[in-house]
Every structure is written in structure tokens, then in C-alpha cells.
Amino acid sequence: MTEKTLRSGALSPGLTGSPEHVKSSVSKFRINKDFLFEYKSVIALLIFMVAVSMISDSFFSTNNMLNILRQTSINAIIAVGMTFVILTSGIDLAVGSILALSGALAATLIGMDFNIMLVVTLTLAAGAAMGAMSGLIIAKGRVQAFIATLATMTLLRGATMVFTDGRPISASSGAASDAFSFIGSGYLFAIPFPIYLMAFTFLAAWFVLNHTRLGRYVYALGGNEAATRLSGINVDRIKLAVYSISGGLSALAGLIVTSRLASAQPTAGNSYELDAIAAVVLGGTSLTGGKGRITGTLVGVLIIGILNNALNLLNVSSYYQLIAKALVILLAVLVDTRSSRQS
Amino acid sequence: MSTQSKSEPVFQMKDVIKIFPGVRALDGACLNIYPGRVMALLGENGAGKSTLMKVMTGIHRCDEGQLKYHGDDVVFRSSRDSRERGVSIIHQELNLIPELSIAENIFLSREPMGRFGRIDWKTMREEAQKLLDLLDVPFDPSTPVGKLSIGVQQMVEIAKALSFSSQVIVMDEPTDALTDKETESLFKVIRQLRSEGKGIVYISHRLQEIFQICDDATVMRDGRFIAETPVYQLTEDDIIEQMVGRSLEEQYPRIEVETGALALEVKNLSAPGVKGISFQLKEGEILGISGLMGAGRTELMKALYGANAAQSGEIRVAGEAKQIKTPAEALQSGIVYISEDRKGDGLVLELSVSENMSLCSLKRFQSAIGKINRSREMDSVQHFIKAFNIKTPSAKQLIKNLSGGNQQKVAIAKGLMINPRVLILDEPTRGVDVGAKKEIYQLINEFKNKGMSILLVSSDMPEVLGMSDRVLVMHEGKITGEFDRQEATQEKLMRCAVGKAA
């Protein structure tokens, strides 16, 4: 079983989507120190999976794997947006609040018998607009991203409370309620639908980051804002774009959560920003911006997802789960800072 | 001028050599500092003054040479070490914490302590007050430094130096940001320090000040000691001649190109740091922009490029009036600016050679669905790597791993990729080794040959004289001189650069 794991691991997306600068070291395929450093999170993930599979028999069942992916999809989709933001050396604390408010909006629209496509489109647009608000404050108001999104986080949570009156909004009645429930609970070819959404999000993000001008500018902006500005690039527009992307993806996550629960909870998404940031950082993206990969984020969300799953399988109490999660994140970041100091 | 005649130097540096990778920053520098006298340290930008002061105060270790303090050999381990042993330097950028009070700044990290590790505020304030009285500073020691003018902040730095009972005080361009009145009171303090027998080194580009306050002048050029002369034996012309030297070797591969139509016309342009600038530039012409550091050259270039907002004036490109408010608009008008500060705002160090090179011109490589055509991008990048002889293992190498000269070539290629009409090169050979310098000159000539118009900003006077068809000199944000190649000499440029009419 161990050998099988390793082989399937070598085909994992963490290796296929590597950007151009590291390919040279891969093509030689020598397992040296650099290689280990470059892929430390993938390696950690593999070791971790092997370890869990040895302790728990049910870990490697198809059912459990799909379960992990479905549970991970929400954090994964948010973390993709967070990757864009962090690559520009920003941060987005408002993702959880955007999730909640857009979820409430979706449930309300469903209750008003709106068409499902219209609900999805309006919700995603509303999320992007909420993200754009953060982006506007950061770009035009020159406010630090941490403070700006702390404000929008609080503001939008408050707006959610006002909008819902602090009570859940049901999404189980209405003309499109069945179609709506498919988003979070449906299956396509025996695979939960949220997994498709997650896969699509990653593919799209990979394309944008590696093959479009916006992607290049995101890296450039995070690497050196002054140089990017001086290269004739509208830096403000890039900032607006990444926060809008983050907001739109938070709304997508909000659709999944709301659909799955068949209701919008006013407290939904609370502290989700922390899991997303943790996943991005675990994936090796630098908080100072300009360095990191979307494939790393995938590895990061999987590490967190599998950790949660494993601790559940092993019947660890939820109190200890928090501590275990914290230790893993801390360890990963410590290794990362040490490696970046060495280089 | 001085009340005291020359005695044994309190600090002596002899034949100091300091080698940085690829550069001999100091190549036989000497400096004597005498008690009770003010020594001017003079030289062009890059002559090695700052490096020499850093060697003196223990920030750099010299590779060869002798340092003597009170007649004994000495090596300071750090600037803190030198300060504690009585050698202080007051840098151009003051090292004060604006939120802390005068007293707290003076005694930072060596606060007088009372019992249980508490700070003895009373003693601290009293000591600070004594120092301020000595310097005639009419402020309470508890005033936050941020509320003081630059001139008074300078006094606080001096008070701090005195609190270490410094025997030697170095002042690096102290009057740069001062008003005339503040300068006057600074001079008063310097005279007072001199009468107390302190040795003072005074670095300034303002030659008039040398005659007002200094007793001796040491001139450096290219890291070398040129002369030490009592000031009363000198004229401004003597100093300028010593600073620029007389040899201008033919190391610049000038070419003659028939100039074409007017490419750029600037009329009465004012922007942050520049005032009322007018000039013209033709196709196939290199216009050198000379001046000392802080003369407003970079500010002018950034205004032309839209990186600094112009307040008034007119810019015409090829006869057409252009509104240039952002770099993007400048690029569209065919103006490109290659920054003097590669690491600061020129390149994105974490990106590869190709990603940096194509950053301004990505639009060209974009397909209809917004995908960047990587192979077309690569073709273009490879073309420039070959044409500019850029030494890199591959186009995918991170730019931070390249040498300064090759980084600079990438930066220039980045500008060239947009096919500019006007190329602005700001210090294109700074931090570049000799071989790469020559290659860059040849590239510039090639551009010129193709009819491009080039603005060449450089602090290196031989470079400006060697490459340019015409030279503008700036001083305090204004153009103070314009010369044709035939009539331009280093002496004339220097005179205009220090604000003395030609």
C-alpha cells in the first residue's frame, strides 16, 4: 500500500503545475537538498497520508477520500482567492463574512422563486462586489490590507446580522430549491459536485496565474510594487481585481455551504479566513508576496483537510484537534522561514 | 581661520584600499584630521568619500591601509564601537526616532539607570539639558524629536555625538536640508567645537561653505587621495580642477550620427523637485543630463515618464502635445524610462529574466482569449539576450542571480521591447563592471544609430562628456547650463553643478 501511495503521489497536481523556474531542477530529477526543499509540503503530505493509513484502515477507502475532498472544497475555493491576494502581498480577512452574506442573499433569492442561474450569477457578482469594496479601500484609500479587510470583515458580518435578523434563512422552499441543493449535495458520476467546483476553480486559477497578463502582474506587484508601477502597469486595478476574485470565490463557497445545509446561517464562515491563510502559507506562498504557486495551495488545503479527517478517524476530541492543527501550521511555517533565511 | 595651528593629527588614515566585488572603491585614500581644525572632504559622486567614512567608523573593514587614532593603530569593530571611543559620524539621513524625546534620543540604549532597572529620568533630562545649553538649542529635552525642524534635529545628533565625548565628528552633507539661518547656527556650533579642540570632517558639495567654515581641504577622485591643502591657499577653480582631474581618456566609443527631426520638446515643465525645465531632443541625439546627487535629475525624468505628476508645462513628442500622467501613457507616447535603482523600482527580483524583460510589453504577446503566447514571448526575449550579449544560463533564470551589468542589460532590453522613440537611461552604468560598461555604451550607440533619442542621466562626468552630443546641467531642480559637446568640459559642468554661473 505504501508503494502505491508514493506512485500516485508523484502524479499529484503538486508536481505537474510547477512554474518555469523550477523545471530545470526537476528535469534532472536528482533528489538533492534543493529538491526536498522545493517539494517539502508535498513530501510532508505524502508522509502524513502514509502515517494515517497505517493507523486507520478506513482512511484509504474511496468513500473517505471523496469525503475529504468534499469537505476540503469550501476551504480550497476560498484559499484560491486568498492565494491571489497574498501573492500581491495583501491579505483578505473578509472572506468568511462575504461567505455568510452572499449565502444569505442566495437563500433569500431562492425563497423568492428566482431562477437558479440568476441566483448563482447574482450571488457571485455580489461577492465580487464586496471584495471590490476591500480592494477599493486598499488601492485608492492606501489603507493596509489587514486593516481594510478587518473593517470590511466586521462591516459585512454586521450587515449579515441585520439582513438575517440573526436567524437562519431557509433555502429548502422555492421553485429552484432542488436545483440549488445540487450545488452542495449533488453527485455527478458518483463524485460530489463541490469537488468539480473545486477542481474547476484550481484549473482556472492556474491558467490565470501562469498564462495571462493578470497573473504575471500579480506576481510582479507582490515582488516589487514600485517597479511594477514604473513598468506602466495600473497597480490599483490589479489590487481591485484580486480582492474581487477573492470575494467572488468566497461567494461560491457560500453557495456550497448554504446549499448543503439548505439554509443560510448568519454565523457561517466564521474564522474561515484563518484556515484559508493557513492553507496558502502551508503551500509555500510567501506572506510578503511575489512568491508562491497555486499548486502549493492545493497541497496546503489537502494537508489541513486530511489532518481534520485523520483526527476524526482517530477519535481525537475536537479540543485537541485545534491544538494539533496549530502545531502543524507552526511547524510548517518555522521550516519555511528557516529555508528562506538560508537562501 | 583657525585659532590653532596644525599639530599632530588626532586621526590619520593612510593608503586605504577597499575592494568591493568588481570595484576598487578606495585605491590609496588618505585623510588627516587635526584637533581644533575643520577638514573638508571633497570629491565627485562616487569618488569614495562615503566609503572612506564607513571604513573610518568601522562599518566597513579596509583591505589594506593604516588607521591611527591618537597615534595608535586602531580598527573599530562597528560604528557603535567607534562612537564609544570618540569617533562619531552624523549621516545625511538622521538616525533619530521621531516619537521619542530629545533626551531619549540622545541617551538611547544607554539610559541612566536607577534602582530596579528603572530609568533615571531626572539625570537624563539634566544631562541632555546641559548638552542643549552648550549648543544653544532653545528646546526642552522632553520635546519629541519629530516636532523639531531638520536643523534642530541635526543639533540633537551633534548633542548625541558630544555625549559620547567625541574627539572626532564627521558631518556628511549636513546643510543639505537646512535653511540659511539653520546653516548659520550650525556653523556657529562647528566653530565652537573647533575651539574646544575637536577634529571635524566636513563633507559638502557646496563649495562656498568650504571657504566659510573649513581650514583644510582633502580632495579625492576615483577612490584615490589627490591633495590636502589649507583652504586659504585654494580658489574654487583649484578645487574643481582637483576634483575632476584633467585626463579624459578615450574610453567612450562615440559615433557621429546625423540628427533628425525633433523627437521631444519640453517647455517650462515643473514637477516635484524640478522647476521651469525647457529643452529639446532630436532623433539620433544623445542628451546628457549632469548634476550632483539631489539636483533633481531623476525627478525630472520621472516627471517626463509620468511617474511623478507634472504641475505645469508642456511635453511634445514628435511635435504632438502629450498628456503624460502615468507611465502607461508615457509608454504609449514612446517614452521609456530605465530606472537608476534596479533593485528599488527597476526590476522584480523574484521574477525570471524573461518575465522582467516582457513586463512592459506583455500586451503584444497576448492572444484573443487573453492567453500569453509563451513561445512568441520567448522568441523576443531570446532575441534580446543574444543581441545584448546577456550572460544568463537561461531566460528562466531568476534575475536576482545575474550580475549587475547583466541585470542592467535586461532592464534596458525591457525598455527596448516597446520600441521607444525616446529612451531615458538613468545612471545606466552604476554598479556595473568595466567590461559591461563598454558593452552598454555600444548598445546606446546602436540605438542612436537607429535614430532613437536618448536622455542619458549620469553622475559620471567623463561618461556624460564621452557619450553625449549635448549636455544639460542641473542644480537644485533647475537647468543651470547647456553645452554642446565641443565646448563642454568637466570644469564647466562642475561649476554649473555646484550652482556657480558658467
Image (cartoon, coloured by chain):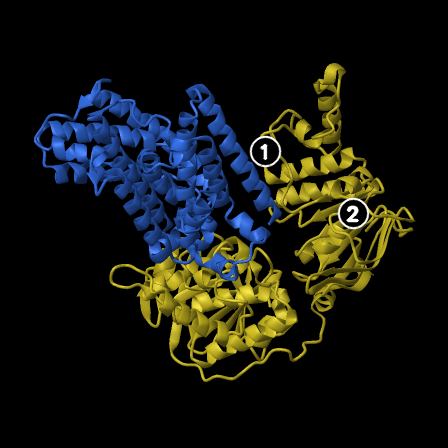
Chain colours: A blue, B yellow
- Residue B117, quarter of the rendered image: top right
Quadrant where the C terminus of chain B is found in the figure: bottom right
Residue in view at x 59 percent, y 78 percent: B487
* Disc 1: host chain: B
Please rate how many residues cluster around mark 1, counting C-alpha atoms within 10 Å: few if below 14, some from 14 to 19, many from 20. Answer: some
* Disc 2: host chain: B
Q: Considering the numbered disc 1 on the image, is that residue within a helix, a strand or a loop? A: loop
Residue B114 percent location from the top left of the image: 75, 17
Residue in view at x 54 percent, y 77 percent: B442
Q: What's the mark number on residue B98?
A: 1
Q: How far apart are marks 2 and 1 (CA)?
A: 26 Å
Name the residue type under label 2: Ile
Q: Nearer the viewer, mark 2 or mark 1?
A: 1
Residue A286 in view of the camera:
no
Q: Which of marks 2 and 1 is nearer the N terminus?
A: 1
Residue in view at x 49 percent, y 71 percent: B385
